[in-house]
Amino acid sequence: MFEETHVKLEGLRRLFAGQASPVEEERAAAHVAGCRECWLLANRAIAEKAGGRVAVQGSLKPLVDLHEIEQARLEEWLEAQAAWIEIKSMTPKARRDKVRLTRSLHTLGFLEVLLDGGASAPASEREEIFILALLTAQQLPAPRVSAELKNDLCAECCAEIANARRRLAKFAAARDALRKGNEYVASGSKDRVAEGRILFVAGALEDDLGDTEGARSILQRAIAIFEASEQNSLLSRTLTQLAFVLAIEYPAEGLQFVERALVLIPESNPRLLWSAEATKFHCLLGIGALHEALLLFGAMRRLEGQFHEPFIQIRSRFNAARLLEHLGRPKRAEALFQEVIAGDLEHGLVKDFYMDLVYLFGFYLKQGQTSEAIAVCRRASEELSLLDDEEGSVEIARDQMRQVWRSLEDEVKRGTVDLRATVTLRKYIKAHWRFPADEMPAFGGRLSGKDRL
């Protein structure tokens, strides 16, 4: 069987000097186009000739054209990185004015820098950076950027703005960004990928607001779009999100979706891989597959070693506590849960702190430890000062949450609370840890003998 061979640097120099035959050029071009190693050597050979500008025809011309496109794109990106460093220390208004009025910033390279920067920025800074990205996308020049592509890019920016707002529990503002995104989608390229991005955030938002079925429906629409357009990266992310939505109430179904996602996630995306595996872990515990969950936990520890941020390390300890709980070792599980909650406090993870208190409350209910469950309610009320420094948190929300925990404490004392209360409380805190609900959640009711604690 005839086997392709790699092209050596000297042979590539001959090619771009015009010293090779047409057949040699065709074979080399076909191989280089599919071989990253040889493509890098080809770039070196091109760069050695007249500063990287080589006049060639025939089968080599696409390679030279691609080299010049990549070179220009990388130079634009480097310029954009330097420009962002210069302006990111400005006030928000000054930055917006600078981005809106400076033509040299209206490039795809600068847009890419802002989208990447927003993704890696602290949660409190993401919204503003993505707004700058939207301003940049709106100013991209025609005809180099078509109107359809510009609208798609604006829709993507709106999706990121909405997601940043969602994570800060600014739900009304997130909906506003999604509405604007849909307006851009209507004038976009019709490949529906931008629409899928909007749907992804809309589905996550519905989950935050406690509408599991609404979230499921929206995310499944996004999945259908990404499958049809063969967008495997976006598809795996959306499958993981849907599995996360379903993990608590429908763990068997969530497991099916996350296993589909894991097949698609490349090793080059360890964060999404960790998120998918963590979701699978909770689904496995939810269906009673304790042994498989234990094995997965061991495998996840190797992946978690790549991350040094407190959040992931704390979640790893939370997972360990859940395993100990399911293995019938409640005292050791309790000790780890308390350590997790202390870690949340130490690192300012306020929402996680309250969500973990909800789990600990349910843990004590299952053990029949009503006095300890009451202590959790009191601790939650005492720590509400943590929300004083949370951007957007309002006093009325803190007052309402204090009433919620006191009401829960009273119902525990009356013996009218079962584990269904943790579902109600979890949904309430997810949606209203910063902003008050229109109505207080209800925990009590007439319980049958088998439901009473």
Image (spheres, rainbow, N blue to C red):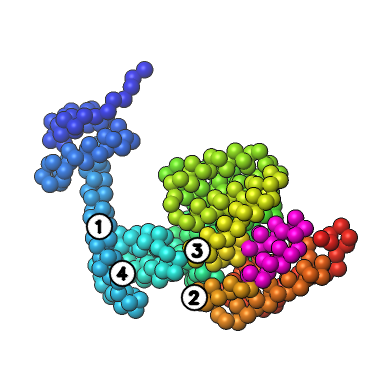
Q: Is 366 part of what is drawn in magenta?
A: yes
On the question of residue 53 being in view, the answer is: yes
Q: Residues within 10 Å of mark 1 (few under 14, many from 20)?
A: some
Residue drawn 68% across the image and 41% down it: 289
The residue indicated by pointer 1 is 78
Q: Which numbered disc flags the more N-terminal residue, 2 or 1? A: 1
Left or right placement of residue 277 versus residue 247 in this view: left
Q: Which numbered disc flags the more N-terminal residue, 3 or 2? A: 3
The residue under label 1 is which amino acid type? Leu
Q: Residues within 10 Å of mark 3 (few under 14, many from 20)?
A: few
> Secondary structure of the magenta portion, mostly?
helix
What's drawn in magenta, residue-wise? Answer: 357-380
- Quick one: 87 or 263, which is closer to the camera? 87
Left or right placement of residue 401 versus residue 181 in this view: right
Question: Height in image: 1 above or below 277?
Answer: above
Seen from this angle, which residue lies furthest left? 50
Secondary structure beneath dot 3 equals helix
Q: Residues within 10 Å of mark 4 (few under 14, many from 20)?
A: few
Q: CA distance from mark 4 to mark 2?
A: 23 Å
Q: CA distance from mark 3 to mark 2?
A: 14 Å
Q: Which numbered disc flags the more N-terminal residue, 3 or 1? A: 1
- Quick one: 21 or 363, which is closer to the camera? 363
The residue under label 3 is which amino acid type? Glu
The residue indicated by pointer 3 is 346
Q: Position of residue 277 (x, y in %)?
A: 56, 46
Numbered disc total: 4
Q: Nearer the viewer, mark 3 or mark 2?
A: 3
Residue drawn 44% across the image and 69% down it: 124
The residue indicated by pointer 2 is 389
The residue indicated by pointer 4 is 88
Q: CA distance from mark 1 to mark 4?
A: 16 Å
The image quarter in which residue 117 lies: bottom left
